[in-house]
Amino acid sequence: MYGKTIRLKRLFPDRRRRLFSVPLDHPVSMGPIDGLEELKPLAEELQDGGADLLIVTKGAVREVAPILAPTTLLGVHVSASTSLGTTSNRKVLVGTAEEAVSLGADVLSVQVNFGIPEEPDMLRDLGIAADQCRQLGLPLLCMAYVKSGSGGTPDELRHAARAAADTGADIVKTSYPGSREEFAKLCRTTPVPVLIGGGVRLDDESAFLKIIADSVAAGAGGICIGRNLFQRRPVGPLARRIAAVLHSEG
């Protein structure tokens, strides 16, 4: 019990400081995409830019461990599928909470894709991961996506986020529902911290930064954004602008 409390305080040390997390697990599902050809230099640049938490697959820990700063938190993502297969939206567990702890993780990450036939299997996996994390005192992050239409209506996103939390997630990442008002409603109806995801890269950087600012104003616990950050070069200056928003004392 105390272990999870202590680790959650490291993730969210102050109500005014939002979590700046960056998922770097894409190479399993999508291959070495633009921006993730080499993980180590990107991880160094993100840390220098103010990122709090880097989320990688268990095999990729070997790349970031040697350069991980003492103040940088580590997430280990254990859901997997690839775009090479015919069921890429069906994620399966490829690791355990015990493995993540042995690798030095501060949080375990799993993914559930709602609205597809395999949804029940992923909810079962979420429940398994939640039980493992409870026993080890490890926080659990669920990346909750709606795979229908254009990424889910506000009602569907609220449902997915609440379902993830009520199945055992301590933190939920989900898609932006389109407006500050809808995201505020999602945060109010989700009983754990909510992180906003970036989704497909936006060409307009100012629009991207506005979504982050609006999310913070609406009650987000922080962000969990990958491609909209690491596919912009140089990464460092943008990361510092994001950190200024998330880590503001105001």
Image (cartoon, helix red, strand yellow):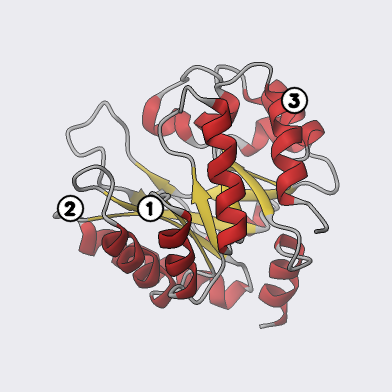
Q: Give the residue pinned by disc 3.
A: 237
CA gap, disc 3 to disc 2?
Answer: 38 Å
**Left or right of 148 in this view: 226:** right
Residue type at mark 2: give it: Ile
Q: Contact, CB < 8 Å: mark 3 with mark 2?
A: no
Reading the image, the residue beneath label 2 is 116
28 vs 102, left or right, is left
Residue that mark 1 sits on? 177
Q: CA distance from mark 2 to mark 1?
A: 19 Å
Write down the quadrant of residue 110 in the picture. bottom left
For marks 2 and 1, give the one nearer the viewer. 1
Are the residues at dot 3 and dot 1 in contact (C-beta closer than 8 Å)? no
Disc assigned to residue 46: none
Q: Secondary structure at mark 1?
A: loop
Labels 2 and 1 touching (C-beta < 8 A): no
Amino acid type of the residue tagged 1 in the rendering: Pro
